[in-house]
Structure formats: C-alpha cells, structure tokens
Amino acid sequence: MRIASVPAGHVYVRHLAHPGSRDGVVRLPDPPVAGVPAGQWWPPPMLDPSWVRAHAAEFDVLHVHFGYDDRSPADLTALAAAVRDTGKALVVTVHDLRNPHHADPAAHDAALGVLVPAADALLTLTPGAAAEIARRWGRAATVVPHPHVVGPDRIAAPRPPHDGFVVGMHAKSVRANADPLPVARALADAVAELPGARLRVDAHDDARGRAVAAALPGVDVRVHPPFSDDDLWDYLTGLDLSVLPYRFGTHSGWLEACHDLGTAVLAPDCGFYAEQAPCLLYGHDERHLDVESLRAAVRRAHDERPAWRADPEERRVQREGIAAVHAAVYRSVAA
C-alpha cells in the first residue's frame, strides 16, 4: 500500500510504521516545498488538488494528519473532490478537535466540517475524542493510541539522578492554547511550600518568550532557542513533574514523550490528555484556572513521586499493533 501522508516527516507519522517494516505500507516522502528550508514539510503540497491529480498514479491513499491550518473549507472541498475523482481513498486522523494554534475555534471547526464527512475512514487517539466525533458528525472513528515519541534506546535508559524535586513548565513559543503566566505564578506559590522543591520555567527566545520572562520576576525562567530532540529529552529527564499550561486542546505529544522518559505530567482537565497516559490533573479551561487543584496536584506529585514510565517492550508491541491497524484501514478503504 502506497500512502501519501500529510505529513510524512512528523515523528508521530514516522512511528506509525512497523518497527521491522513488515506492515506492507510505504509512505511517500514529503514533497519539497518551494521557498522554505530543506526538510520543512509545511505548507504541504499534497493538500493541493493539483498535486493529487498530478501524482495519483503514485499513491493509493491520502492520509491527512496535520498541515491544513491555512486551508479554507473551499480548498478542502476541492481536495476531497480531487481524491474522489482520481479513484483514491481519503483517511483522516483527528488529532485536534480544537486547534491549539487558533484562539478562535471557527476555522478549525469549518475544516473538520469538510474533512470528517468526506473521509473514507477516520482515526483518532482516545475514546473521548471518538465519542466527540460521533456526537458532532455521526461518524465512527477507529481509536489508535499515540505511538512512542522518544527512541527505544532512550526509553530504556536510566534516568539521571538530581537533587531535590524539580517542577518544570515550558511556555515554548506561547501557542494560543497556552496560558503560561497565571499557571507559572500558581506553581511558584505551590512549589514554595514544598521542602526541596524548585520551579523551572522555560520559553523560546522570541518576543512572546521574552515577555514571559519579563512578567515573572523572581522565577527561574530560562529563555533559549528551541531544543534539539536530544536536548529536549535531557530537559525532560531533569524534571520530576512537567506541567502543561493549556486552557484548551485535545491530545499531546509532549505528554507521550514524558511518559517515554518517566517524567510525571500535570495536565489540564480539558481535552483528553488523561486518556493518553497516566497523569495528574488540575482544573484549567478557557473560563477558569483552578489554583487549588493545581496546588493539590503538585503536592501529591511531591509526596508520592509517581514513577509512571513506558516500558520499551510494551511500546514496541504497541507500535506493531498501531502499524497493523493502519495497514488494515488502508486495505479496507483502498478496496
């Protein structure tokens, strides 16, 4: 089966493949994108109806994951028509029921309003998301868990020791769904009450990241360029608790990476994070930040030191199962 994945180069999509390449699936590489650095997959040419028509002989299934943020409903309707007209199948994985980069949900709702009904098959990552898809569109989505993010050798590696109890919150480039300042201030108060605990806040070296640092005097804020993968894994293994400052969202690759590395996660109770992997929860959505639930969760993490960590062999078996489900879906829709 030849799959045009949008994108192919994302770590999630790469880890859908059978680790021994025994699933009978070949994913096309991302086409080069004019005017951007080599290796960048966005904006994806595969979402252009002209690309679909020109390359229809090269693939059997178009599988859309990410990358349609800038596409209008008319654009996506034309894409679905091109797939149908060329006799190919359309598969959509609904990663985000609410786009974390959009403050206003309307554009993403409109995009899903085209893609979900047009798809020959739907997948998603959690039962809660599948239930929401069924409620909104009357469509059944196959639930397939998120594969590992970190490589098997790093999953199996022992965690390096460090002193004290380190709570971390990374503001990254301050996406629309993140509300880092009130979360960081509440964390600073919570951590100050715990013996041996300290708070570390990180942000990217851009205008929004520097604004976070300026607004948090007295907090250990580290502003720097985005981490490489290895630097990110080192950062996460240096934390005892990673706090997600999201006020809306659906699923999280960050949470999966923490699970691979054995770093406990404190996630908001919006979205379906708790269905992905074991984690602590606090109350946080677009209307309210429940500071007391955040403080209680940090205290619990400090007292109990939860050691939730993925087992490398279980991750391997899970990935083989994920690959098998995708291969079966591709065969079904192509037939």
Image (spheres, helix red, strand yellow):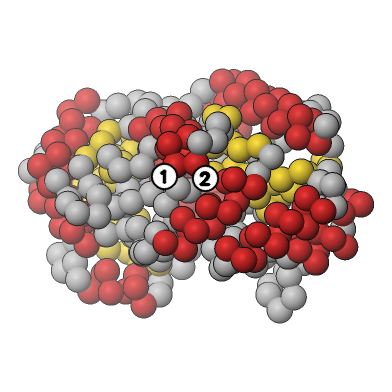
Q: Quadrant of residue 312?
A: top right
Q: For mark 2, give the secondary structure.
A: loop
Judge whether residue 258 can be spotted in this image.
no
Task: Give the distance between the C-alpha atoms of the residues marked 2 and 1, in whole angstroms.
Answer: 7 Å
Q: For mark 1, give the secondary structure.
A: loop
State the residue position of label 1: 250
Residue 266 is left or right of residue 252, and the answer is left
State the residue position of label 2: 95
Q: Earlier in the sequence, mark 2 or mark 1?
A: 2
* Tag 2: amino acid: His
Q: Quadrant of residue 299?
A: top left
Measured as percent of width and height from the top left, residue 194 is found at 11, 40
Locate the C terminus by quadrant.
top right
Q: Badge 1, how many Cα within 10 Å: few under 14, some, many 20+?
A: many
* Tag 1: amino acid: Thr
Asked if marks 2 and 1 touch (Cβ < 8 Å), the reply is yes
Q: Is residue 98 above or below residue 146?
A: below
The residue lying at 61 percent from left, 32 percent from top is 152
Instruction: Name the residue nearer the viewer: 230 or 296.
Output: 296
Measured as percent of width and height from the top left, residue 148 is found at 56, 35
